[in-house]
Image: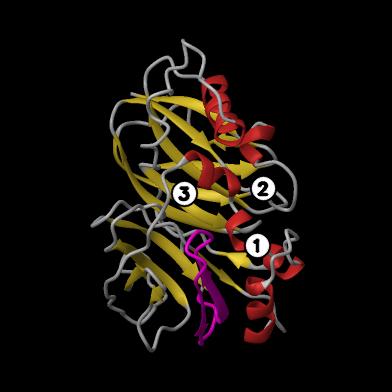
Amino acid sequence: MNRRTLLKVSAASMAALALPTATRTLAQATPEAGDLPELSITVRDDGFDIPDGLTAGRYAVSVINAGMAPAHASLGLLPVGIDLAMVEDAMASESEAVPQWMLDTKWVGLPDWGFPGETRTGIVDLPPGMYLGFSPFEGWFNIIEIPGETISVPDPAATVSVELVEMAFTWGQDALPSGPQLLQITNAGATLHDIQFLSVPEGATTDHAMEMFMLEETGGTPSPDNLLANLNDEWAPVAACSILAPGVTTWIDIDLAPGSYLVMCPLPFPSGPPHAFLGMMEVITVA
């Protein structure tokens, strides 16, 4: 599997990434909602920095970017029976095929795409097992064992929600309000998804975005009325969740200013065009 092709649209539509350095702190997971243990994850140039002694549970997570470019990485619970050698073989392969075990991995959906020096936060569930952390752009990967038992706690009180399905977003409210919100994200579909929010000028459309994405592959000049023509090299999500497996729920903190946002899922899994090209892309207005 050629790692650089895993998220083709993300690579084509955003600036190239470099991934940071930093540190993390850990508190033990407890079954009490409202008083969640804190977990700090630092994404570095060569991998995740995750504290020793991490146990299964629900965490208030902070993902820290200490690098020079937006940080993009995913974390997922590997299927039983997948070992380090199998992961190494897949990551070293130049095949375009995505191994079935990667599609079956329970990706947990971390707060994603933090800008250099930024910390993005949310709430994440980490069941016990062996985890894969990886960057589709930098090419690094980590294997992380998280022992313990599955802990059942009440869900946090989200202020807004969205479900990811094939191939659309199902919102739990008529419109997203501006300001600080806890966004509950559930993959209610049958394949892997993620979600990214990109600030766009008022009047921008999904047709404008599609044209810019295609020009990354074909070259050429944008249409004169394309409001995104001058943003192509500057795009990076202002809020995002990394890969999320079917049936998994995660929460991210968002703080959107009033304006227009392109919301999309760029994943091409299991094979074929990015989900955004199949309808999983829309422009929303935040009041």
How many labels were placed on the picture? 3
Question: The C terminus is located in which quarter?
Answer: top left
Which residue in the protein does label 1 denote?
Answer: 2
Considering depth in this image, is 60 or 79 the residue closer to the camera?
79
Name of the residue lying farthest toward the left: 117
Which residue in the protein does label 2 denote?
Answer: 268
Tell me which label, 2 or 3, sits earlier in the chain.
3
Tell me if I can see residue 41 in this picture: yes
Q: Which mark is residue 184?
A: 3
What's the residue type where badge 2 is placed? Pro
What's the residue type where badge 1 is placed? Asn
At horizontal 57% and vertical 30% (from top left) the residue drawn is 219
Q: Which residues are magenta?
A: 127-151
Figure check: 200 above or below 27: above
What's the residue type where badge 3 is placed? Gln
Left or right of residue 85, residue 74 in this image: left
Tell me how far mark 1 sits from mark 3, CA to CA: 32 Å
Left or right of residue 89, residue 8 in this image: left
Mark 3 Cα-neighbour bin, 10 Å: few <14, some 14–19, many ≥20: many
Name of the residue lying farthest toward the top: 225
